[in-house]
Image: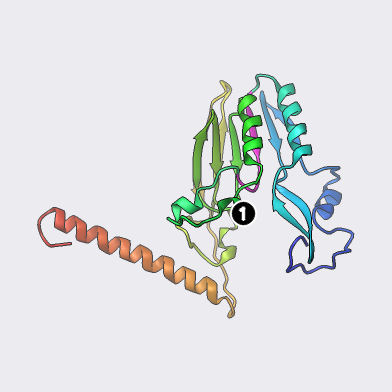
Amino acid sequence: GWSSRRKVPVDDPELGMKMILKRLGMDRTYYSFDHKGWHFFVLDSLFEIETSSGPSYEPRIGEEQLHWLALDLAAAGDRPKVGVVHIAAFCNMGQIGGDPEAKAMNHMVVRDNKDLREVLERHRVTALLQGHSHQIEDFYYGGVHYITSPSVSAAWWGGNWRGFEPGYTILNAHADGRLTWHRTTFPWEHQLEPEDTLERQRIAEREAFEAEQKRLREAERAAARGLAPV
């Protein structure tokens, strides 16, 4: 319901986060727990705001949650720590697309990512697990791994647009404090509606790109062997 395209009235009693909190019996959208010597924390990156069209959100952790996080990590002491957040603290979509005008901070990265990063760094968090972009990215900065996974529901957009099949990340939290991970794909057959013209266009563009990459690779290999010009 936090969208100008909402399908429920703005006075719906379960608008926004209220429904999931009620169904799960939770009093807030962020929490932490310990498991086998590791400390895990889950953050909420959808910060509620009011707009001219009603309730909406912006990508932000917020001061209240950051204060809670700092104390929670302090209490965890030297245990290895892993966090989970939906909207990323790091996302390189502008650089990946070669677009100098890309405004990654607008909707792909939490706006208080610097404040979040500093809390993670000073409490020596091992990794922050991220999503939202549906593409694979790994960053390492300030002693923290930022691990972005694809999505098992990636084909909700109608297919593979960016070179990442639907999938997920398997992480192994070792007893000695090391964290290792690898990705795996997830079989998914997307279904397109007749009006899904944008999806068909982007799928076609991706397929054309991959075909051209294959053609160029073969041409360059032939040229390297002195068989043909590029």
Q: Is residue 1 magenta?
A: no
Q: Residue at x 19, y 55 (%)?
A: 221
Q: Residue at x 57, y 23 (%)?
A: 177
Q: Is residue 83 magenta?
A: yes
Q: Amino acid at mark 1?
A: Asn
As drawn, is 187 to the left or to the right of 12? left
Whether residue 212 is visible here, answered yes or no, is: yes
Q: Measuring from the top left, give residue 195's x and y in whole percent.
A: 59, 79
Residue 145 placement: quadrant? top right
Q: Measuring from the top left, give residue 178's x and y in whole percent.
A: 54, 26
Secondary structure, mark 1, is: helix
The answer to which of 178 and 216 lies nearer the viewer is: 216
| Residue 100 against residue 6 in the figure, above or below | above
Determine the residue located farthest toward the left in the rendered image. 226
| Residue 203 against residue 131 in the figure, above or below | below
The N terminus sits in image quarter = bottom right
**Number of residues whose C-alpha sits closer than 10 Å to that of mark 1, classed few (under 14), some (14–19) or many (20 or more):** few
Whether residue 182 is visible here, answered yes or no, is: no
The C terminus sits in image quarter = bottom left
Q: Pointer 1: what residue?
A: 106
Residue 82 placement: quadrant? top right
Q: Measuring from the top left, give residue 229's x and y in whole percent.
A: 14, 62
The magenta region covers 80-88
As drawn, is 182 to the left or to the right of 230? right
Q: Residue at x 12, y 62 (%)?
A: 228
Q: Residue at x 84, y 51 (%)?
A: 23
The answer to which of 52 and 181 lies nearer the viewer is: 52
| Residue 144 against residue 110 in the figure, above or below | above
